[in-house]
Amino acid sequence: MSSADLRDLYQQVIMDHNKKPRNFIDMADANHLAHGNNPLCGDALVVYVKLDGDVIQDLSFQGSGCAISMASASLMTEALKGKTLAEAEVIYQQVHDQLTGESEVDAADLGKLEVLGGVKEFPARVKCATLSWHTMHSALENGTDTEVTTE
């Protein structure tokens, strides 16, 4: 995919998920949750996870923030529902590596999440895109009501 095509797709997907976020609900029966906050830009969210054994049975979020933050959270919930903890960890690391450039990621492995790679062009916005992912990771690792702050 050319960089112009990826940029157009990035903008379309980000705007769609920002305007109509998927899984944007307070999950009353979540057994894991974490609060995420980026005080520099005002993004704040709660990630709710319902684990059944080692499978993410349900995943949702609530909060407010910029288009990138909300779209990333929405895409994350779609990508991780039904995944095992091991699968979620692999996807988390791939997305993190893609956004931060820490290592090369095969875009084909990411599927729809590939569009988040467009955030690399805006280094100041990487924390917006990773907030929900770090918050989800904390919820899975720590179980109950944890706090994640990115700056």
Image (cartoon, grey):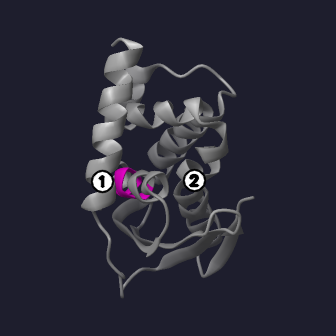
Alpha-carbon neighbours of circle 1 within 10 Å: few (<14), some, or many (≥20)? some
Residue farthest along the right direction in this orientation: 151
Question: Please, what is the three-letter code of the amino acid marked with disc 2?
Answer: Cys
Residue extending farthest bottom: 28
* Residue found at x 35% / y 46%: 14
Q: Residue at x 53, y 59 (%)?
A: 132
Q: Per the image, is 85 magenta?
A: no
Q: Vertical placement of 86 versus 36: above or below?
A: above
For label 2, the residue is 128
Side (left or right) of 130 relative to 23 = right
Looking at the picture, tell me which residue is in the foreground, 102 or 49: 102
Q: Amino acid at mark 1?
A: His
Q: Quadrant of residue 59?
A: bottom left
Along the horizontal axis of the image, is 145 left or right of 14? right
Q: Secondary structure at mark 1?
A: helix
Residue 93 in picture, x, y percent from top left: 58, 39
Please state the extent of the stretch shown in magenta in the rendering. 73-77
Secondary structure type for disc 2: helix
Q: Quadrant of residue 110?
A: top left
Q: Which residue is mark 1?
A: 17
Gap in angstroms between the C-alphas marked 1 and 2: 14 Å
User: Where is the N terminus found, in terms of image quarters?
Assistant: top left
